[in-house]
Amino acid sequence: MIRIKQDKERARSILGMIDEREKVVKKLDEIGFSTIIAENYYEIIKELCTAIALTEGFKFVGDNSHKELIEFMKKNKEITEGDVSIMDDLRIRRNKSSYEGRKIEIVYLENNKESLLEIIGKLKKVLKKKLEEDEV
């Protein structure tokens, strides 16, 4: 983690990309594309966390940066230990998919989709609140 100048403009730009990714994910068939959908949920969560960190003047780089980024979200009262645990589990599954070619089964999505969407909602709420700070 390194200290940088707050970058709300970049955070807004990331939020726009997240909206596009969400539109694509909604169109995919869960049975045939469970891995792609789970990977996209991970990317959405990771980018929301990145945007939040940018609004606070932090950037995560290097090995374990995504794990540290997820852990950083604990400081937001809206994000629970359980949320962080789910995000980290998804990170591990996504890494196994990306680097080892392991499929993320449909049962994972069936069991976790609601929680993942709830976490995405919480992160968006945190981000939007941070983007509104100092703008009034």
Image (tube, rainbow, N blue to C red):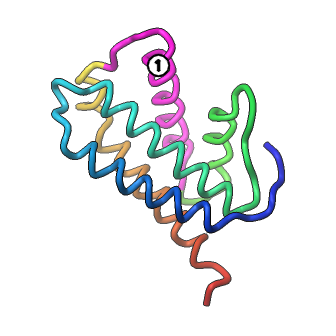
- Residue at image coords 47%, 35%: 86
Q: Quick one: 118 or 51, which is closer to the camera?
A: 51
Residue underneath mark 1? 98
Q: Main secondary structure of the magenta part?
A: helix
Numbered range of the magenta stretch = 79-104
Q: Amino acid at mark 1?
A: Ser
Q: Is residue 72 above or below residue 34?
A: below
Q: Quick one: 37 or 72, which is closer to the camera?
A: 37
Q: Is residue 100 above or below residue 61?
A: above
Q: Quadrant of residue 102?
A: top left
Residue 89 horizontal/vertical position (percent): 49, 27
Q: Is residue 46 above or below residue 109?
A: below
Residue 39 horizontal/vertical position (percent): 40, 31
Relative placement, left or right, of 18 versus 131 is left
Q: Residue 83 lies in magenta, yes or no?
A: yes
Residue 5 horizontal/vertical position (percent): 80, 62
Q: Quadrant of the N terminus?
A: top right
Q: Quick one: 7 or 84, which is closer to the camera?
A: 7
Q: Is residue 34 above or below residue 136?
A: above
Q: Quick one: 13 or 80, which is closer to the camera?
A: 13
Q: Quadrant of the C terminus?
A: bottom right
Q: Quadrant of residue 129?
A: bottom right
- Residue at image coords 58%, 61%: 11
Residue 81 horizontal/vertical position (percent): 56, 43
